[in-house]
Image: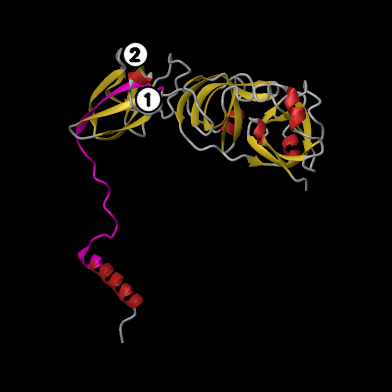
Amino acid sequence: MAPDLKTVRRGGIAALAALALISGCSLQPAPQFQVSGTGNISGILFLDRDGNGQFDPSAGDSALGNVHLQVYNRGTTTTFPGGDLHTDSLGRFTVPNIPAGTQSIEIDTTGISTKVSFCNNPVPVSVYLNETAFVAVNGQGGCVVSIDSAQNLPLNSRITIKGTVTSTVAQISTGQAYVEDATGGIELFSPTGSTFNIGDVIEVSGTLTTFSGEFEVSPVTVNTVTPGTPLDPFVVTSSDAASAAGDVKANLQGRLIEIKAGKLIDVFTTGAGRNAQIDDGSGAVAVRFDSHVVADTNTLKTTFTAGKCYNWTGILKGFTNPGVELFPRTLSEAVEVPCP
């Protein structure tokens, strides 16, 4: 009869333990050995405008000269000899004879523009025995936070966010564009920098403010643009949309949404002929076609019929009165469907 596998395993472990006792060896691993010797650190400190971690003046990157740096023994505040220095006029620095291992470079941000952020400070650097380690220390336009985290900061805070474009500049209103991440959406007012399309993933930096009851980033600069995929609208009821009114931090404000089978209550009789009320049976909310989408309001009266139902897609914008309005990005984002 073959021996039981568990018995064999137990026997093997017991034999190893006995052997360890006889030989006086410990089964505990030995402590890590310490490397003795030094290496050098060389590097550059720069503003990384395209956020790729590489110094490239042709991409708008610029060296940060005369900035105070300190090279610390990792996990301490002990500065190595020669490790308290300033970058030269070209943003370069060299620190010789640093003990091998992972050490820390801390950037003194005193005097540096508030538009430059060091998202990892201190910066870890691996020093190799008898070698020179090169490190590119990049400042950025800002440290990326989620949209809902940004909206919980004090007004006039400088923020950096990253999201998918849901509306291009002036597509629905003058100067306005919209981006969205997993936590919410927000307006970008008159962004400068690279152009972008719906579906692109962009990183922007600017000042958090409000206008007419809506969060916006203004002034705002586009840092990076990466091609992406357009988002599907978030399906909500007309009552859900209306409930976002009056709360500038409501998650639905600034997002691309869809209201299914919303019955048109009136044929655009308010808001200079651009506003109407729709209701999917849960409660009414305002919809508005701005002049960038429909130039002639008579088009609205000939396209839509009161009492009919439509699937409505657009950006839910905060406003003062009414508290929110659904802004379709094109006339085709209102599609007639049977009423339930």
Query: For the N terminus, which image quadrant?
Result: bottom left
Q: Work out whether residue 299 or residue 19 is closer to the camera in this orientation and state it.
A: 299
Tell me the distance, in whole angstroms, between the alpha carbons under discs 1 and 2: 15 Å
Q: Residue at x 50, y 25 (%)?
A: 204
Give the image location of residue 215, x and y in percent: 64, 25
Q: Work out whether residue 131 or residue 297 is closer to the camera in this orientation and state it.
A: 297
Would residue 169 be found to the left or right of residue 126 on screen?
right
Give the image location of residue 97, x and y in percent: 21, 27
**Above or below, 121 relative to 5:** above
Mark sitting earlier along the chain (1/2): 2
Q: Is residue 161 magenta?
A: no
Quadrant of residue 155 in the image? top right
Q: Residue at x 71, y 21 (%)?
A: 296
Question: Does residue 47 show up?
Answer: yes
Location of mark 1 (residue): 138
Q: Which residues are magenta?
A: 20-49
Give the image location of residue 138, x and y in percent: 37, 25
Foreground label between 1 and 2: 1
What's the amino acid at mark 2?
Asn
Q: Is residue 27 magenta?
A: yes
Would residue 233 be found to the left or right of residue 105 on screen?
right
Location of mark 2 (residue): 66
Quadrant of residue 124 in the image? top left
Quadrant of residue 218 in the image? top right
